[in-house]
Image: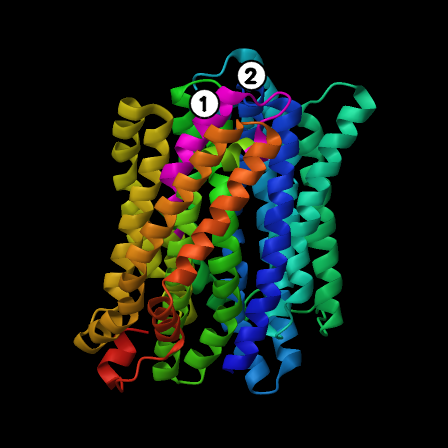
Amino acid sequence: MGRRMGIAALIVSGGVLVSRLLGQAREVIFAALLGADATTDQYVAAFALPDFLNYLLAGGFLAITFIPIFSPYLARGDEEGGWIALSAILRPIALGIVGLVAVGWLAAPTVIERLFPNFTAAETAATVRYTRIVLPAQVFFVLGGLFTAVQYAKGVFTIPTLAPVIYNLGIILGGVGYAVATGDPDPEGFVWGALVGAFAGNFALQWWGAHRVGMRLVTGAGWRHPALREYLVIAVPLMIGQSIVVLDETFMRVFGNLVGDGVQTQLQYARRTMLVPVGVIAQAAGVAAYPFLANLFAEGRREAMAAAVDRALKYVLVISLGAGALVAATTVPAIRLLFQRAAFDASDTMASAEALFFYAFAIPVWGALQVLTRAFYARRDMWTPVVVGSIASVAAVPLYLLLQRGFGLRGVALASTLALAGYTAALAVRWYATDEARRRARRMLEPTLRAVPLAVAGGVIAALVATGVELAWGTGFLATTVAVVTAVGAFGAAALLAGGALGSIWRAARTPNQAPPSVEGDQAGG
């Protein structure tokens, strides 16, 4: 089981790395063609309503909701029953998302006006047009999410990892193709590219991939099939509750718009840069681990499931601490290297770098969330993350308002990090709720705490090296490249010089907790 999970994690990690790099390339091209101003803010804002409609049908959680329903059919050898269950669930979801898209199309002008009151009439009209173009992509995301879940449940990860790769390629080709064809770069090209990429990568390819593993849709699946009721039991909490994770990007858009023109875009560049290491380190681990955790829970192997969660958390936290320290140390040269060219100027670089510094501290937080939320979902406890996340969302609003008014762009990024940290801490307290679970938590956190001073020291050294290189050689493209490369090298050298300490931390992160869990701790803590 562990070897299979490791192989799956490597596959997903490779796919996530490629998709994140392409996503970063997409942002680089977008920044070069359009910069960061009121026009680019309209593009960022155009995704607020489509994303929310996706969340209303738990579109982002389809793998999480469907795998626990489908896996028992496979476990007892009733694959035909699994396809009937899929068909019973697919039909109402398809009708639901098509209906929501139609409502969103009609409601777009009112919603955009309410969410972004600082937009002028012309800016609102452009945002509505972009929103209506991209809205149908949600149909492809939601239905493709079910096809992806089928492949995950069957232990196939390669084709699903291609979905974001093709989606990002579609956006890049749409934006560049529009600029070449018209001679005038415009966000509309990127929006059309998003729609085409969603159809090709998230829907058509995943439909083919699901058929490769045997998927068969059954027309006679009844509306009262027990799988549909089971899906609603699992999914309804995710539909009615909006956690801080779900709303984080929306908060970025809404409160960024209150700061001024271009701020939404600058925040997005910083946030997407931060999410690259999160995706490669933590998202891959969480996606790959989830089907195995769900299977362990279905088989009644609670102790093995708890141990798997502990191992995943140790790995993610230790690696994410280093990634966060390195990103915080290289914010200015990294943003300059990635984005500062053509329409994206030095002032945009400094603004995005300031936001990235605060976002960097959220990298370990995002990492822990990827594991903890899936641990709850794997044991079919949907309500705990949703209730805690909804409370965190309500509490985040005054926090965002206070920090946005006091610190502008930096305040929005800091509010995001603090709100997510509070949500993560609350989930961790709930997961490790019993005495035995708390003992496991202390053993799990030991390598993480030992890694903190090493990460800080490495980050300081990397920052000094990057600053020294830029002071000596200037801030041109070549000098900035050298600054980033040498900073990464300095960070790695500092880690190697840690020698035995680093080795012991890594061994501790890979070693299962040795104390035998009690039945009480196993049930309450994973």
The way the protein has been coloured in the rendering is rainbow
Amino acid at the residue labelled 1 = Phe
Left/right placement of residue 370 relative to residue 184 reads left
Between 455 and 384, the one lying in front of the other is 455
Figure quadrant of the C terminus: bottom left
Between 389 and 448, the one lying in front of the other is 448
Element type where label 1 sits in the image:
loop
* Residue displayed at 50% across by 51% down: 489
> Residue 497: percent from the left, percent from the top?
39, 61
Residue found at the very far right of the displayed protein: 181
Magenta highlight on residue 334:
no
Which contiguous range is marked in magenta?
337-363
> Residue 20: percent from the left, percent from the top?
59, 49
Asked if residue 198 can be seen in this view, the reply is: no
**Badge 2 or badge 1: first in the primary sequence:** 1
Residue found at the very far front of the displayed protein: 472
Label at residue 116: 1
